[in-house]
Amino acid sequence: MAQKQVFSKSEYAYGEIKQRILADDLRPGAAVNQEGIAAELGISTTPVREAFKRLASEGLMVLATHKDARVTELTFVEARSLYELRLNIDPLAARWAAERRTEGDIAAIRAAVSALHPLTGTAELPALIAHREFHRAVYRASHNQPMIEILDSLWDKADRYRQFTLKYRTDTEPEIERVRAEHQALADAVIDGEPSAAEDVMRQHISRSLGRQAIEKLRPEETPES
């Protein structure tokens, strides 16, 4: 019983801290004191320390000292690396999804695309979650478990770069409509069983994504395109 209670508090601390990072309430580079966050959450430092370790293993925090951690900085190198991975993996996942989707997958994709909200300004967490759930519904339809695990592991890091880009981008109705149309076209291609179309739409979508735009915002002036 005691172990279950400690686990529950660790999960609680992990969820609370992670949400603050993804919502940009804890900014890149921000110091997070173990004792301070424990007092704020009304729990002991042990579950907070476990949460720090878990977030560090996911690349969202850096353990600074025994009691402190920092939110991982956003970097050009990481933004480019995430983009390179997604530009190659997501289109393949979409192709396989169109080839392998089941009736259950189709229902999940239809529900997810209908729940999407535009990512504008500093996006609220529900909008980010809806966006994630749509893409997850697509790549889970690939029925390739290693690929699904890779894309799941990338998503939290990628969301931080989406939030970063949204701060600097001026949202326009044509841009909002473009993204909406791409999401719908992707859903339709997978549901209709059109692998080439699904792959092409996904590649185009990633190539114009917030993650791609983050690279340009973070690019050092002296860094070549390659």
Image: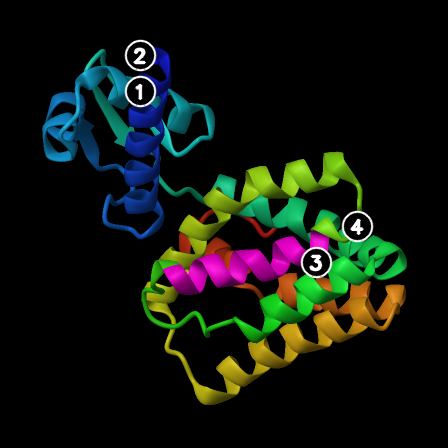
Residue type, label 3: Val
Residue 62 image-quadrant placement: top left
**Residue matched to label 1:** 5
Identify residue type, mark 1: Gln
Could you give the CA–CA distance between mark 2 and mark 4, rounded to whole angstroms? 40 Å
Residue at 31 percent of width and 52 percent of height: 23
| Residue 36, position as x, y percentages in the image | 10, 28
- N-terminal label among 2 and 3: 2
The foreground one among 134 and 180 is 134
Q: What residue is disc 2 on?
A: 2
At mark 1, the secondary structure is helix
Q: Is residue 71 among the parts visible in the rendering?
A: no
Q: Secondary structure at mark 2?
A: helix
- The spot of residue 13 in percent (x, y) is 28, 31
Q: Nearer the viewer, residue 180 or 65?
A: 180
Disc 1 residue crowd, few under 14, some 14–19, many 20+, Cα 10 Å: few
Whether residues under marks 1 and 2 lie with C-beta atoms below 8 angstroms apart, the answer is yes
Residue mark closest to the camera, 3 vs 1: 1
